[in-house]
Amino acid sequence: MRASTRSFVRSTFLAAAALGSTTACIPYTVGSTAQTAPVGESTIAGSYYFMPNAIRIGDTLAAPLWGVDHEWRHGMDDHSDAGFRLTPGGALVSYKRRFADYAPGQPALAFMVGGGVVNWGDHAEVDATLIASGNELAGVMPFGGLRAIQVIPITRGAVSDSPTIGGFGGIQLGDAAFSIRPELGVYYDLSALGLRRNRVILIPAVTLARGRGHTAAAATSSDSRTRTVQKPATTRGGLVCNLLGVCREPPCAPGSTLCN
């Protein structure tokens, strides 16, 4: 068998195996803003992502990869939450900490670190992300940031890989109760298996997020601030005294029917 034919067969086999998993395996998509989940509450999100021209088949053909991640986040305190993410072929945990809140002209900022197992148990994964976003209560809110990912072989025969570094950006449509987050990631990522030539990859994605959110909390807080204390009703005795104009200081005691 000629070398070129063997190369084509090998590339086709690897591509078919990758396409069979229908996933990019590494969690490129962030799908999250700088806002953390409310204390004691959980949010749920599903990210649907697509990698064009992800796999090279021969010298001229290329095939895409796509995948779906599911993430649950739970609020730990006013500024942090913890997450659990399922990817096709992996599972990860993460911690997010918000260190700057949104203010007019200034974004909210948070960092997120995580790790777990990917590629069907062949690799461990660690990642770090810096996230910036705008006013969470706005109907349309921009978000974006920087992300670094490193996978480490943990089984015999698993290939080594170089770090993946890049950025992402998108908008959130809706509110914290339910939102849609279109996102585009741009990463510098060398293919460890040599399945593609491009070193810069684009990852378009959309995330659907659901949670009780902060609009309800904001409304509750606003109600508590504007709530007024009702004054006690005027007693019958006090009313009689006031009408007759004969009450002495201090006025009649509550419940009294006669003037003092």
Image: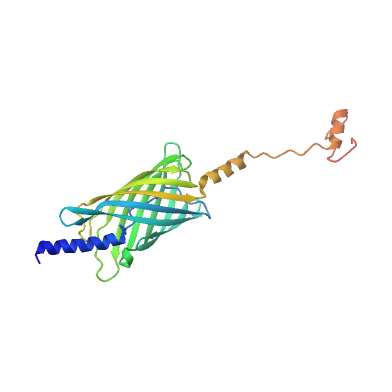
- Residue 150 visible? The answer is yes
* Colouring scheme, one of rainbow, by chain, secondary structure, one colour: rainbow
Pick out the residue farthest to the left. 2
Could you say which quadrant of the image residue 196 lies in?
A: bottom left
Give the residue displayed 44% in from the left and 57% down from the top: 83
Residue 251 vertical position relative to residue 132 in the rendered view, above or below: above
Q: What quarter of the picture does the C terminus occupy?
A: top right
Residue 112: x and y, percent? 39, 53
Numbered-mark total: 0
Q: Is residue 245 visible?
A: no
User: Taking 225 as reference, is 240 left or right?
Assistant: right
- The N terminus sits in image quarter: bottom left
Which quadrant of the structure image shows residue 95?
A: bottom left
- In this rendering, the answer to whether 240 lies above or below 27 is above
> On the rendered structure, is 80 left or right of 159?
right
x, y percentage for residue 10? Answer: 18, 64
Residue 167 rendering spot, x and y as whole percentages: 31, 48
Q: In this view of the protein, which residue sits in the foreground, 17 or 111?
A: 17
In the drawing, does residue 170 fall left or right of residue 57? right
Kindly indicate the quadrant of the structure image that contains residue 227. top right
Q: Position of residue 92 (x, y in %)?
A: 39, 61
Query: Is residue 55 toward the left or the right of residue 72 in the image?
Result: left
Residue toward you, 29 or 109: 29
